Image (tube, rainbow, N blue to C red):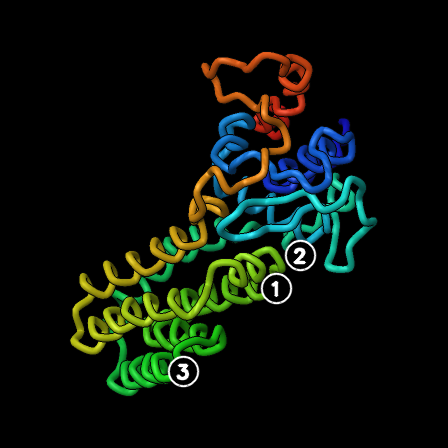
Amino acid sequence: MFHLEAVSAQRLYRLIAERIAQKIRAGGFPVGSRLPAERELAELLQVSRSSVREALIALELSGYVEVRVGSGVYVTTARGPGTPALAASGNAPGIADSGIGIGPFELLQARLLIEPECAAYAACKGTQAQRAKVRQAQRALSDAGAGNHLDRAFHAAIAAACGNAALEAVVLHLWNLAEASPVYERLGKHFVDRKVWGLAAIEHDRIADAILTQDPIRARHAMSAHLIAVMARLREDFADSLPQAKHPPAACDAFPSRGRRRRPGTADCAASLAWAAPVSSVVEPI
């Protein structure tokens, strides 16, 4: 009988981050230059834009880049800053991870599977007192206009009203994981402002109204719509809000999309695209 040691899979966003960091350290993306757009990186690496988004935030936390919402992502250093205080682990030293190894969009996807059903159960199974706490939490959040702790309290009140202790524990655990994630926190800082809280308040009102009127179908749909909207807001492009002409050149002008004609004099840079071999080929199990 033989023994094989377990292999721990590294999170995809960390592999993407390390691939880009290697390119930065090698001088392929000079300091001060703007990285290619997320959609272009996602196409070249054959991964989702969500994974690229998480990788860029991890690079920012590790000191390689600066994210300027409305402009793009800019290289700030050509060498790794050493192991960052907020936890580097796995196979990519110097790249900050979420602290838990789970990406923000994975957490949101898990919430999307669980919380709509909790809302439906709260509408049809919650006691009058439990539904009253949902309304109280919703009003407190609405009056404050913002506040992650109040947001959590609202969703926790719904979980408590669902009548299933296991589901409630899962919801609270997912929130704990999100609050422990520096990547999640930084995403929020970039994209969650007063306007976003205003949109979320409208969504929370719809969820609470459905629960208070004991309409499980509407409660489920309202919660699903809210979480899908949260993911959409966190996926907004870093650079789309400014005209392209106002951007400095990208780190590599010869970063051609498939099928685009390469400009003269860019052969050397284009040849370096070997770094952008699909990341999926790295993480596929043997």
| Residue 117, quarter of the rendered image | bottom left
Crowding at mark 1 (Cα within 10 Å: few <14, some 14-19, many 20+): some
Task: Please provide percent x and percent y for residue 198.
Answer: 34, 70
Secondary structure under badge 2? loop
Q: Which residue is mark 3?
A: 144
Secondary structure under badge 3? helix
Q: CA distance from mark 2 to mark 1?
A: 7 Å
Residue type marked 2: Gly
* Quadrant of the snapshot with the C terminus: top right
Q: Which residue is mark 2?
A: 99
Q: Which residue is mark 1?
A: 180
Furthest toward the right, the residue is: 82
Q: Determine contact: label 2, label 1, CB under 8 Å.
A: yes
Q: Residue at x 81, y 49 (%)?
A: 81
Q: Is residue 272 above or below residue 16?
A: above
Q: Is residue 155 above or below residue 244?
A: below
